[in-house]
Amino acid sequence: MQASVDLIIEGSTVRCLGNWTAPHLHEIEKRLARVEWPVTDVRFDLGGIDSLDTVGAWLLFRTIRELESASGESGYTVQQVGADAQTRRLLELVGAKSEGTDQPPMPYLPGVLESVGRHLGSLLEECLAFLHFIGNLSLVTVRSCLRPWRIRWPKVVQELHAAGVNALPIVGLLTFLIGIVIAYQGGIVLRDYGANIYIADIVGLSMVRELAPLITAIIVAGRTGSAYTAEIGTMMVTEEVDALRSMGVAPLEMLVLPKLIALMIALPLLTVFADAMGLFGGLIMANSMLNLNPATFLSRLAEALTLDAYLSGIGKAPVFAAIIAAVGCFQGFRVFGSAGSVGRQTTMSVVESIFMVIIVDAAFSVAFARLGI
Amino acid sequence: MQIVHDSRLDSPSSIENAYVLQGRDLSQSFGAKQVFSGINLGIRPGEVLAIVGGSGSGKSTLMRQLALLQTPTSGAVTVFGATVTDMEAMSANALRRRLGVMFQQGALFGDLTVLENVSFPLQEHTELSHSLIEQVAMVKIALAGLQPDTAALFPSQLSGGMRKRVAVARGIALDPAILFLDEPSSGLDPISADAMDELVLQLKETLGLAVILVTHDMDSLWRVADRIVLLADGKVAAEGSIRELVDSSNMVAREFFHSRRGRATGAMYA
């Protein structure tokens, strides 16, 4: 098969043939790198070129330029012949635009120490900004609580529906499954000891005190916290937040407060639902695996599960809700510039709110233990 | 008085071969709303064709159809003699490589530097070495009128005018035969807009590009457009050089080019 592009070196004449265009040039590029140039005057015959694009022109220009600078020292000359007007024009063009090709500038890459420093700096800056945001939000909340008729209640109801009612299926299903798993894992051990009845203690306490509030908060952080960031972030990109500000409407009051109120109502309610579904899962598993009938399970549950335990689980939910809403909205307001930033901040929002929820949960456990609850 | 509509476009004839790109009987509707229908136009090698029309007249949609980015509701686009009716077909991809597009907002990849943005099409479609690709990309960046040190910047660090220039550099990376420019001077200050016009002319002259231009800018129409297609009421209302359109008796063309802006710009070039 005939090559569509070729380079023939006959003595001191270099003949370029065919289509010197980008899709065909990789072979020629490799060959040019290996050529041992004759140590005499060189003549480039460009008459055989059928078509030439800027890539081909650049390759020719580069080759000729290198050869010129090498042969210039030894007194040889490099000549071009046979080029048509189009070829000459392109060669001139790429030659005129060759500034910066020797060393294409690279983006500045900071060293390890600088990266660490910058990262730490931005982390500190973010912590300060978050504190600032929490402060502002608290002010707005207190001010609004003093004038509750100013709160946008229709918006609260809307958010309540989105964050609460719509989350029921997923929260219910997941906590039901977790109830089953806990009962199964506990049941294996209890059966060996003949202590089947205590399955109600295990499922009841672990679900109600820890797992239901935590799992619900994590689901809501992923589901609703991310939605808050994306919603506010998109409004930042399209300058809607600035538009609100320009009309004298405080974005915190309009966008954040209804979300905060709604989530602080929705999350405890979801947690109650999660408690019920988790216990239901445990009950089903106890019945089928340990042959514990539901009545026995429930009566044991009533003894094992104190009001303190129940309230300590539910009581954490509003705190988790405040964290999720605050982090979600805060990250939304940190969106800057392009749409790509919305995605980044949303990811950060979910990671940070789950992280903070777990930290706060641990703090609650320590505090409750000290208080003897 | 000159008849502005080019009647040769209506009948497929021997002239057809002169066009590198041709849209035949193109129409677009969204649901029940018809944006335009029965549009015929073609572009010859080395020609700057401007598509103009009021807001919402479907200029950008028409450009997207011609650039093989949107399947027309009916009609077909012929590029280099190959007729494309299905934009999703693999064969359309090979044709797209020979078309360059500059989108209105630049559409640069935000996580790549300017140099990487311009190198991208070459990396994807050729097997050239990395260093050669970077050198060629630097030539394209210089061709688009940018300083070499711009190459290391990210799109977010660029001004609107520079972003458009980078988009042009990326558009011509593969030496396309046809370059599409969507509102190249919109949102630019007068100096940058003038420079953009000069860039289009320079590219046309040096690389022999055919350019399809969607614009509102009267200055660009006077300065760079060889031929203008005026869209109105979902049809080609008028077609011809700017002088022909300005002097025509066509009502739509008169309204458009004798608007206050049209007259002011026309007076400068008269």
Image: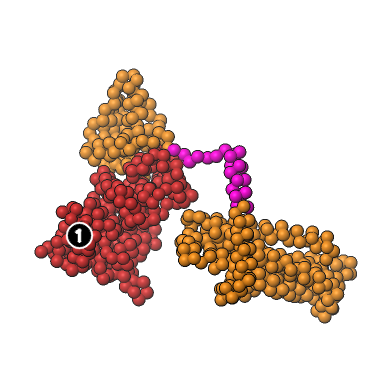
Q: Is residue B94 above or below residue A155?
A: above
Q: Is residue B20 above or below residue A220?
A: above
Q: Which quadrant of the structure image shows residue B14?
A: bottom left
- Image coordinates of residue A261 in percent, x first then y, are 63, 70
- Give the chain of mark 1: B
Is A281 magenta? The answer is no
Q: Chain B: give its colour.
A: red
Please state, as top left, top right, bottom left or bottom right, where the N terminus of chain B lies in the image.
bottom left
- Magenta range is A105-127
Please state, as top left, top right, bottom left or bottom right, where the C terminus of chain B lies in the image.
bottom left
Tag 1 residue:
B263
Q: Chain A: give its colour.
A: orange
The chief SS type of the magenta part is: helix
Is A111 magenta? The answer is yes
Q: Which quadrant of the structure image shows residue A20?
A: top left
* Left or right placement of residue B75 versus residue A288 in this view: left
For the point 84% across and 72% down, the residue is A304
* Left or right placement of residue B249 versus residue A236 in this view: left
Question: Could you tell me the amino acid type at mark 1?
Answer: Arg
Residue in front for this viewpoint, A350 or A33: A350
Q: Which quadrant of the structure image shows residue A257?
A: bottom right
Residue in front for this viewpoint, A335 or A201: A335
Looking at the image, which residue sits at the far bottom?
Answer: A295
Q: Secondary structure at mark 1?
A: helix
Residue A309 in sight here: yes
Residue in front for this viewpoint, A138 or B15: A138
- Image coordinates of residue B60 in percent, x first then y, are 33, 62
For the point 73% across and 61% down, the residue is A361
Number of residue marks: 1
